[in-house]
Image: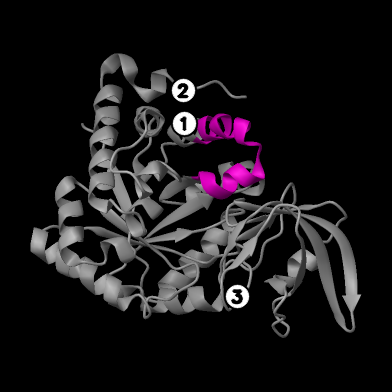
Amino acid sequence: MKDRLEIYATLGPSCADPEILRRMFAEGITGMRLNLSHGSLERSSSLIEAFHRAENLEGVQISLLIDMQGPELRIGSIAKHKMLTEGEEVLLHDKRLRDMNDSIPIPQEVIRNYEDGMILLIDDGRIRLKAEDLIQNGQETMIKARVLTGGALLSRKSIAVQDMSITGDTLTEQDLMNLKEAAAYGVTDVMQPFVRGASDLRTVKNALREAGAGNCRLFAKIENRTGVAALSEILPETDMIVIARGDLGNAVPLWELPCVQKEISAQCLKHQVPFMVVTQMLASMENSPVPTRAEVSDIFNAVADGASAVMITGESASGKYPVQASSYLVRTAKEGLRWRERDDHAPSKLMPRRI
């Protein structure tokens, strides 16, 4: 029996036209992800409408996956994008308090866990800050930090502390609202970020049942050391493991990330739990109609190692070439599947040893 391969792209402005989506489906995309980390189903209704129109145009049924907010920490709203430069000194304040024009709003949990020299990673580590001092400003406590790696700072981007696990509640109020509306919008899959253990997934399952969306599949994103360590208890509770290399690459040194990916893949294969590989699979195609050799090798190897699913994000959501990116993703993934279905290349025979 042939393995089933699921191939996801991400909804966004670049593929908001039903005709573009139809062409992506024609290329072989089987599912679409909707990022709800800082939005709602209601606010995304026009995108979802375009998605369903494209399904009808192409005469196919495509999975609709919503990616929740979950316990991930995020900075607050910024009136306009702020450009940070290397060496610059910045102040960070509790985002629950009043806005401060010259300061960056961050979660209170980060301030509460302050340590001298801790490294703050913003927007999947694209911006790096080093904490230098804790300042009392009246009744407000602020962090003074130095920019190590600069860039454009935008609202609601992720923030993490290197080598420190700080997270919030399993489901936010926005998550609960989205789950209640999931069935009405045709959602088939739910992706829970930063899964820390079995209890996170049970919480989501209970919320889905209460919302009348108990038939939705539940995907568990592994994004930090806590999730990796708890993999054995997570596996029985999920329909698919998601190896989310963006934040996972902040949690471990980048040179260790491929080893972590291999280890998670091996455990999923051992316990016969499907897994998906995501993040920067075709990142260059946000601005180029042709991928790099390294990118197609990455996709091929993920599938050859046993992945049941792969996904692109910004490449289709905001990139210039969503159809072309979909085509390269599908064709390369299918080549990887053909390779692993050869008897001498079965993943069970190539399972990496435990590190």
Comparing 82 with 257, the one in front is 82
Nearer the N terminus, badge 1 or badge 2? Answer: 1
Residue 257 in which image quadrant: top right
Magenta: predominant secondary structure element? helix
Separation of disc 1 and disc 3 at Cα?
45 Å
Figure quadrant of the N terminus: top left
Using the rendered image of the protein, determine whether residue 274 is visible from the camera's viewpoint.
no
User: Measured from the top left, where is residue 265 in percent x and y?
Assistant: 47, 34
- Asked whether 251 falls inside the magenta stretch, the response is yes
The kind of residue on which mark 2 rests is: Met
Separation of disc 2 and disc 3 at Cα?
46 Å
User: Measured from the top left, where is residue 212 in percent x and y?
Assistant: 36, 75
Decide: few, some or many residues near mark 2? Use Cα within 10 Å; few <14, some 14-19, many ≥20.
some
Q: Which circle, 1 or 2, is nearer the viewer?
A: 2
The kind of residue on which mark 3 rests is: Ile
Q: Are marks 1 and 2 in contact (CB under 8 Å)?
A: yes
Nearer the N terminus, badge 1 or badge 3? Answer: 3
The residue shown at (75%, 72%) is 108
Figure quadrant of the C terminus: top right
Residue 35 placement, left or right of 257: left
Q: Which residue is mark 1?
A: 270
The figure's colour scheme reads: one colour
Q: Which residue is mark 3?
A: 78
Helix, strand or loop for disc 2: loop
User: Measured from the top left, where is residue 196 in percent x and y?
Assistant: 62, 54
The residue shown at (22%, 70%) is 50
User: In the image, which disc is placed on residue 351?
Assistant: 2
